[in-house]
């Protein structure tokens, strides 16, 4: 599973989550909401240290990751993090 970002999405994370070099940002599965892949589950995001990284992407000294036990959510899809100009927040696409 790969993780990729648009420039606008990276800028949002740096500004809104106050991300600095050396930080870790986790994408995690949360119960509630929905996604194109799963009913009743959605993707959450938090700054936290990893325990057992299943997939990661380092950008400008920040490590974005998904824990091994959350990889089931992606069903062998890659995560594309874009930016929704209308809502002024990240948006997520899942592509095989």
Image (cartoon, rainbow, N blue to C red):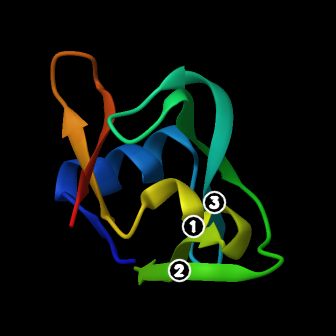
**Does 88 appear above or below 79?**
above
Q: Within the image, what quadrant is residue 48 found in? A: bottom right
Q: Position of residue 73 (x, y in %)?
A: 53, 54
Mark 2: which secondary structure? Answer: strand
| Camera-nearest label, 3 or 1 | 1
Marks 1,2: beta carbons within 8 A = yes
Kindly report the distance in space between the C-alpha atoms of the residues bearing marks 2 and 3.
10 Å
Residue that mark 1 sits on:
71
Image side of residue 32 versus residue 36, left or right: right
> Which residue is drawn at the image coordinates 16% and 26% (left, top)?
85
Q: Callout 3: 10 Å neighbours few (<14), some, many (20+)?
A: some
Is 53 on the left-hand or right-hand side of 15?
A: right
Q: Which of 13 and 65 is in front in this view?
A: 65
The circle on residue 26 is 3
SS for dot 1: helix
> Image point 33% across, 56% down: which residue?
10
Q: Picture coordinates of residue 89 (x, y %)?
A: 34, 29
Q: Which residue is drawn at 44% across and 49% down?
A: 13
In the rendered image, which quarter contains the N terminus? bottom left
């Amino acid at each position: 599973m790969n993780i990729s970002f648009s420039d606008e999405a990276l800028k949002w994370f740096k500004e809104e989550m106050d991300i600095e070099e050396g930080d870790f940002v986790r994408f995690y599965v949360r119960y509630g909401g929905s996604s194109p892949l799963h009913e009743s589950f959605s993707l959450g995001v938090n700054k936290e240290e990893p325990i057992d990284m299943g997939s990661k992407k380092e950008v400008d000294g920040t490590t974005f990751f998904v824990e091994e036990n959350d990889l089931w959510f992606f069903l062998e899809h890659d995560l594309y993090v874009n930016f929704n100009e209308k809502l002024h927040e990240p948006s997520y696409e899942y592509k095989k």
